Amino acid sequence: MKQPILPQIDRNRAAMDEALYRSINPDMHVRHFCTYGRDASLYYMEGVVSTDFLQRYVLAPLTLLRQETAESSLADAVSNAVYNCDVASARDIPEAVTQVMNGRAVVFIDGMDVALGFDVRMFVRRGISPPLTESVVLGPHQGFNESIRDSITLLRRILPTPELIGEMRVIGERYPVSLCVMYLKDAVDADNLARLKARLDGVRTDHVLSIGALQQLIEDRPFSLIPQCILTERPDRAASMLLEGQIVLVLDGAPQVLVLPGSILHLLHTPDDTSARWQYGTFMRLIRLLGTLCALLLPGLFVALVTFHPEVLPVTLLTAILESQSAVPLSIPAETLLMLVMFNLIGEASTRVPSVVGSTLGTVSGLILGQAAVDAKLVHPLLLIVVAVSSLGSYAVPDYSLGLAVRIGQLLLLAAGCVFGIYGMVLFMAAGTVRLCALTSLGSPFAAPMSPLRTHNPDELARWPIWRQRLRTWLAGTADQQRADGAMRRWDRRNR
């Protein structure tokens, strides 16, 4: 049972000292003073409050009040006296402790059966910096940081409208963390919003460490290789998804936000596609799709053709492969697997080392190890080219999680090609496509608008001119999904 706050301040002090473990917690502070002729105590945690604000806007006004108040409510009188800070009341000790841990200064006054928490927070936080994993040539260069208030402000700066709703809540039963559910009221689908809130209410865990952990707790198919949610660290991308009717989850302490529901197209698109002219955006998407297909199919296809279907290859190419293979002690499947593992190891190592030497390590390691493997006759040169092209294709995938899924799928397709040839690869791809079409994200079809077909802007694999994109996506809940009334280029008669 929760311990209520009592009018006797001595009992409240003892309860707070015990709950905050003040005897062994040196950063839990208390200041005793008098206000309105009564004993008072102020509890706060060092490092998360501004001591200057605390002294200037809370302690100074309250200590100057020496006379008894004429107001009927002592809590109202104190709240009116401290008018520079947001104030929240607490009626039990656990609620007061939560406010202290969240950075508020909590005041107890003798004779008052509630505590008042004043917002004087000033957390140590990182400044606004460019995104690390979603860099663009055209577009803003601002990324989210670990402060939930900064992340919400960045979104509200892009969409300055009261229809952008930000519902604050906590997640985690024993050690809660702040979470904000953001959506556009006129665009979001009510069923999707209710479904997401039900999932958040159904999360039972002591603490949510990161936004990626939250994704695993609420996604539709946790055993699926392909992620069904979108993680982004770009405010402009999150704002564009809000405009399309999607929901954004902002977690305190996470430099990314989680967007639901999503689709496979969202994982393949980048902000550059919209910022660039439609011809350039379409070209970049086709190159990106080509890179994804090369990453998935090229190693397995090479092994399947050489091992099971040599008649498909030109005679000169097949002769060159067999001549170089005669001097290599390993089989072609073993060579391919060895090279793929080596390139994945280089990529992971270049990610974990300091950024100053990361790019140099990846380039030099690839060149030196590849050339050394060819000179030592462990692999033949054509296989090195095949693996290098497929590795480049995996780095062209814009979403980090999808890129990892492509690398795992590359190994699975290689295994299918090594055992069953092209027929095994075709069967595996057909099963993967069926599985992709069966996936859902927050109950919405993950492969839409292609499967099943949905009304959509001409912005799928190819990006048509932006003035022809007048509809919200199929994820929006409005009955009238028309975004613009008539042509966007009203000055141009050809586009009316």
Image (cartoon, rainbow, N blue to C red):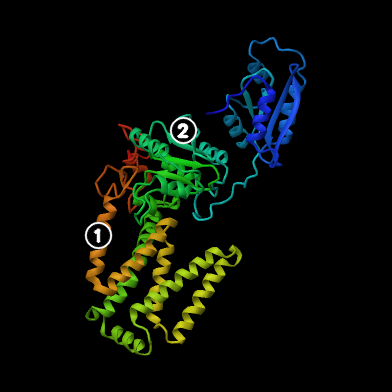
Residue at 39% from the left image edge and 48% from the top image edge: 229
Q: Is residue 119 visible?
A: no
Residue 353 placement (x, y as % from top left): 57, 65
Q: Is residue 152 left or right of residue 463?
A: right
Which residue in the protein does label 2 denote?
164
Closer-to-camera residue (219/255): 219
Question: Above or below — where is 409 with respect to 342?
Answer: above
Q: Is residue 393 visible?
A: yes
Residue 330 placement (x, y as % from top left): 37, 84
Q: CA distance from mark 1 to mark 2?
A: 40 Å
- Mark 1 surroundings within 10 Å by alpha-carbon count, few (fewer than 14), some (14 through 19), many (20 or more): few
- Quadrant of res 89: top right
Question: Above or below — where is 208 with respect to 74?
Answer: below
- Quadrant of res 112: top right
Quadrant (top left/top right/bottom left/bottom right) for the C terminus = top left
Residue 176 has which mark?
none
Residue 483 placement (x, y as % from top left): 36, 36
* Mark 2: amino acid: Leu
Q: Secondary structure at mark 1?
A: helix
Residue at 33% from the left image edge and 70% from the top image edge: 298
* Mark 1: amino acid: Ala
- Quadrant of res 423: bottom left
Residue at 43% from the left image edge and 42% from the top image edge: 240
* In this rendering, the label closer to the viewer, 1 or 2: 1
Q: Earlier in the sequence, mark 1 or mark 2?
A: 2
Q: Is residue 416 left or right of residue 255?
A: left
Q: Secondary structure at mark 2?
A: strand
Residue 431 has which mark?
1
- Mark 2 surroundings within 10 Å by alpha-carbon count, few (fewer than 14), some (14 through 19), many (20 or more): some
Closer-to-camera residue (69/325): 69
